[in-house]
Image: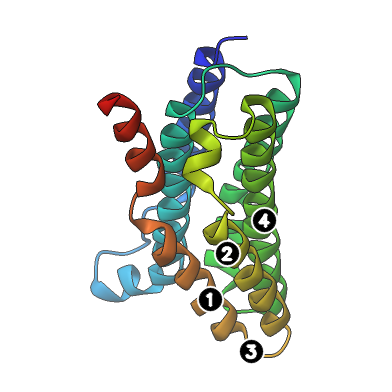
Amino acid sequence: MHKGRVEAFSDGVIAIIITIMVLEMKVPHGSDWGALVALAPVFLSYVLSFVYVGIYWNNHHHMFQAVDRVDGTVLWANLHLLFWLSLVPFVTGWLGEGGMHRLPVVLYGVVLTGAAIAYTLLVLALERQHGPASAIERAVGRGVKEWVSIGIYLSALASAFVFEPLALGLYVVVAVIWLVPDRRFERVLSQGEDR
């Protein structure tokens, strides 16, 4: 199968996810700075989640530039990733409204961990389909960023049961690790154009 439909569908779902997140942000009640400050946790959780969804969209785009085709396994792996990303608006809203309480922080981490695992499974499915020495295989290599991220998420989940701000800080650390577009794909794709 051609990859175009997967990319288009994923772009649409991700656009809807961002739209839902921004629509969940309510206008402040009042017209002073205090009303705006009261919404700071909601806004900060939105910013973090927007960055995360943007990171997934950006890396998904780069990754699919390194592949030619998809199969049923890739389709399901991609849907698995979109499932976890579709939960981001819910956990973002709860984190923003619920503050730094254990359960919202833990559930936010569960969704981030699920998305990271799903992304890694999608990479593995694409590597399996395209074989060794393919562009996707050369770009990802051992997948160190992916596995380090999952490890940090698991550490964050454990720390959320002890000290919630540490867990949130670790979620930010993973976002910073991925904030720069994944140059692995750009490097491999530019090498292919040089040939």
User: Could one spot residue 182 in this view of the protein?
Assistant: no
- Say what amino acid the circle numbered 4 marks: Val
Q: Residue furthest top?
A: 1
Tell me, for residue 149, which label it has, or none: 2
In the rendered image of this protein, does residue 139 appear above or below residue 166? Answer: above
Label 4 – label 2 distance at C-alpha: 13 Å
Along the line of sight, the residue nearer the viewer: 21 or 26: 21
Contact? badges 2 and 3 (CB < 8 Å): no
Label 3 – label 1 distance at C-alpha: 11 Å
Q: Residue at x 67, y 81 (%)?
A: 160
Q: Earlier in the sequence, mark 4 or mark 2?
A: 4
- Say what amino acid the circle numbered 2 marks: Ser
Tell me, for residue 111, which label it has, or none: 4
77 relative position to 145: left or right: right
Q: Residue at x 49, y 66 (%)?
A: 174
Q: Report the colour scheme.
A: rainbow
Q: Earlier in the sequence, mark 1 or mark 4?
A: 4
Q: Earlier in the sequence, mark 4 or mark 3?
A: 4
Instruction: Find disc 1 in the rendering and name its residue.
Output: 170
Q: Earlier in the sequence, mark 2 or mark 1?
A: 2
Along the line of sight, the residue nearer the viewer: 159 or 46: 159
**Residue 41 x %, y %:** 45, 70
Instruction: Find disc 3 in the rendering and name its residue.
Output: 163
Along the line of sight, the residue nearer the viewer: 128 or 181: 128
- Say what amino acid the circle numbered 3 marks: Phe
Disc nearest the viewer among 4 and 2: 2
